[in-house]
Amino acid sequence: MAQCVTKVELSISCDSLIDKDVGSKSDPLCVLLQNVGGDQWTELNRTEKIKNCQNPQFSKKLLIDYYFEKVQKVKFGIYDIDNKSYDLSDDDYLGGAECTLGQIVSSKILVQPLMLKKGKPAGKSIITICAEEIKDTRVVSIDVEARNLDKKDFLGKSDPFLEFYKQSDSGKWQLVYRSEVIKNNLNPCWKKFSVPLQTFCSGDFNRQIKVHCYDYDSDGSHDLIGSFESTLSQLQKAGDSSPVEFECIHP
């Protein structure tokens, strides 16, 4: 018997995470688990770790198969990562949320409070889960470089990195890609990157894309260097010999 299944992409963000680190903010990561019966859970995927951040927006998307006629219980766990070990048992638990995948898919945006393991609220922490069905398997590849960026560091040049956002149907901006940091450089050339078209612009070439350029600070207080807005249609006009240029200015 054929099963009705589709692949779903989950975007995760959190607000007001509790702080477990003394003298600095937590380094959170989100892990996605699925119930496989009883009290048994298996890990499906996890996001990247974000350093020194109590309001993380994770750039890595979590993919999961959604079976229309099944009740799929899922759990999201937020951990403070203080070592390089893949094992989470020695990391501080910042809170978690349980629901069904159907709840997320039907609401498209699900907001829940984070709970500690003994059923207590994790302070005022909340998790926001955005779901998007993968309908387009194409991939977009982009090269970005900048010239004459503003200097934000008093004793040195800036350490720039980029964040790309797409505008959701609700009008909110959703993080779709975060670049690497290039140290001490006002004319950076970032690595070429590839992102699924569905992730980047929901398959809509005219959907608004916003790009922020930040000066990285290890304590998480990144300074905005500048930003601009575009669409994939505009970005597509770039060729090997004719790049598209934008003014990256602080609004």
Image (cartoon, rainbow, N blue to C red):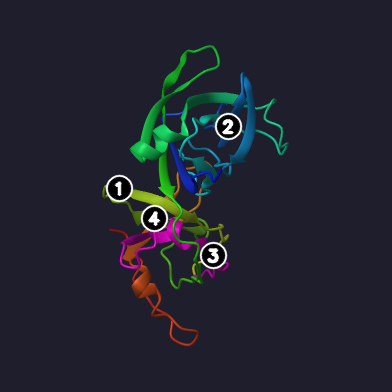
Where does the image place residue 166, in percent across and percent down from the top left? 36, 56
Which SS class for mark 2? strand
**Mark number displayed over residue 34:** 2
* x 39%, y 62%: residue: 203
Give the answer, above or below, for where 229 lies relative to 219.
below
How packed is label 3: few (under 14 Cα within 10 Å), some, or many (20 or more)? Answer: few
Residue under label 1: 172
- Residue topped by disc 3: 194
Counting from the top left corner in percent of width and height, residue 134 is at 46, 54
Estimate the spatial distance between the alpha carbons at disc 3 and disc 1, rounded to whole Å.
23 Å
Task: Tell me which numbered mark, 4 or 1, is placed earlier along the sequence.
Answer: 4
Q: CA distance from mark 1 to mark 2?
A: 28 Å
Quarter-of-image position of residue 45:
top right
| Kind of residue at disc 1 | Lys
Q: Does 70 sit above or below residue 199? A: above
Q: Nearer the viewer, mark 2 or mark 3?
A: 2
Q: Nearer the viewer, mark 2 or mark 4?
A: 2
Please tell me which of labels 2 and 4 falls first in the chain.
Answer: 2
Badge 2: few (under 14), some or many (20 or more) residues near its Cα, within 10 Å? many
Instruction: Tell me the residue at 48%/56% (across/down).
Output: 177
Q: Please tell me whether residue 192 belongs to the stretch shown in magenta.
A: yes
Span of residues in magenta: 187-212
Q: Amino acid at mark 2?
A: Gln
List the residue tagged with mark 4.
165
How far separated are the C-alphas under marks 3 and 4? 15 Å
Nearer-N-terminus badge (3/1): 1
Figure quadrant of the N terminus: top right
